[in-house]
Amino acid sequence: MNMNTLSYGLLGLLARKESSGYELMLRIQPFWQAKHSQIYPLLARMEEKGLLSSYWVQQSDKPDKKIYAITEDGISKLREWMHQPIAPSVTKDELSLRTFSLWLSEIGVSVEIYQERRELYTEKKRYYEELLAGIPQGQCHPGSKEFGSYILATKALMTVDAELKWCDWVLKLLTEHSYAAAGRE
Amino acid sequence: MNMNTLSYGLLGLLARKESSGYELMLRIQPFWQAKHSQIYPLLARMEEKGLLSSYWVQQSDKPDKKIYAITEDGISKLREWMHQPIAPSVTKDELSLRTFSLWLSEIGVSVEIYQERRELYTEKKRYYEELLAGIPQGQCHPGSKEFGSYILATKALMTVDAELKWCDWVLKLLTEHSYAAAGRE
DNA sequence: ACGCGCATGTAAAGGGTTACATGATTGG
DNA sequence: CCAATCATGTAACCCTTTACATGCGCGT
């Protein structure tokens, strides 16, 4: 059956804990941005093929939800994937392309752009800090199910820290240049 | 006309220096992964709409190439884009999804995975260092055309450094655990 | 009243990869 | 001799987003 990378990612999350499609979307979001409209059909297809099973849970205050669990066949499929080569990461950031044309903007506008991005990174940092705080420490040694979440959250934090430092550095260059230009007037 | 983010990125590169489609692919690659099969039709469409002009250059040792240059209309289009909001970055890394299921692999296999990734990051680091070295220093102050390339190459370097440190940290955790397990035998 | 979060799903359109097609030159 | 780099382009397929569709409860 035709399984893409995202399908294996969902399978991997379900192997650790059964979840609804909505919960899976929230769990995978920080590491692989996917909308619900992409996830729901993949789950339905994997259930058809016997990799997943599901049952409905009724909720009083919120809409009912469909909980998926991985089957033995699903775990076999996941184990097969673990031996496959890993594709390099793909990053697409509009800010990078915008930066190519920065010379077309006034410095004041540039400053706003990187300040806005700085705020976005600050929010992301808070998010990943909470994620890391939510992982039961001490039990996340190599081999445990929590270990993966632990090292991934740490990676996200280290990366966002580097991005924040970069923003500060760029903003320093931009504002120093502004002061120097003002001084020359 | 329907312009996507990649089209604006190409337009921005052409605003700084006229190039062939092949050269644009190489220039944009480090910041936005796109294949030639995606780039060529976009360039043709932008030329049709009058945003680009082109001429053929004959080469003796290599195949002939088609050089594109931005037009006045193209620069107007680019300036309009500069006022639009910037979409947040999207990253898709198969290693992250694989890490969710790391507990299914033996530690030896995990070590191989992160060592391989470490080598990939090391190569990337060398690449970005060369890129940065190729930018004429001193002339890349805010407002200059080189400034964008300068800060982008620096960002890539800072990020890849964080990723390398992360790999080393993960490998330390994995190997320490292996030694401890061996000691318990 | 309005928007947001929860919760599931489908359809259409657009973005992106893989494969097909061609062909010269250079280095191992 | 085989692979890689340079160089352009098209077609089929898959991946992803946006929009449509529904509906309740909560906070402002």
Image (spheres, coloured by chain):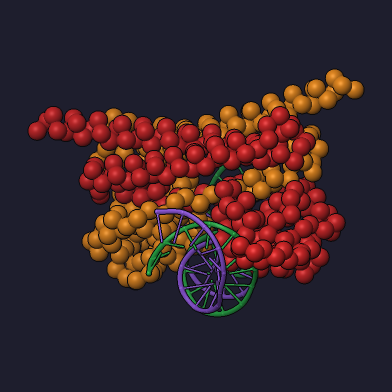
Chain colours: A orange, B red, C purple, D green
| Residue A93 falls left or right of residue B177 | right
- Give the percent coordinates (x, y) of residue B33: 56, 54
Q: Residue at x 62, y 52 (%)?
A: B28
- Give the percent coordinates (x, y) of residue B68: 74, 60
Image height of B133 relative to C27, above or below: above
In front here: A126 or B175? B175
In front here: B40 or A125? B40
Image height of B66 relative to B101, above or below: below
Identity of the residue furthest to the top in this view: A183
In front here: D10 or B104? D10
| Residue A13 falls left or right of residue A22 | left
Identity of the residue furthest to the left in this view: B185
| Residue A122 falls left or right of residue B8 | left
Q: Residue at x 35, y 55 (%)?
A: A85
- Give the percent coordinates (x, y) of residue C28: 40, 54
Quadrant of the frame with the C terminus of chain A: top right
Image height of D16 relative to B123, above or below: below
Decide if residue A22 is in sight here. Answer: yes
Q: Residue at x 36, y 61 (%)?
A: A56
In front here: D20 or D3? D3
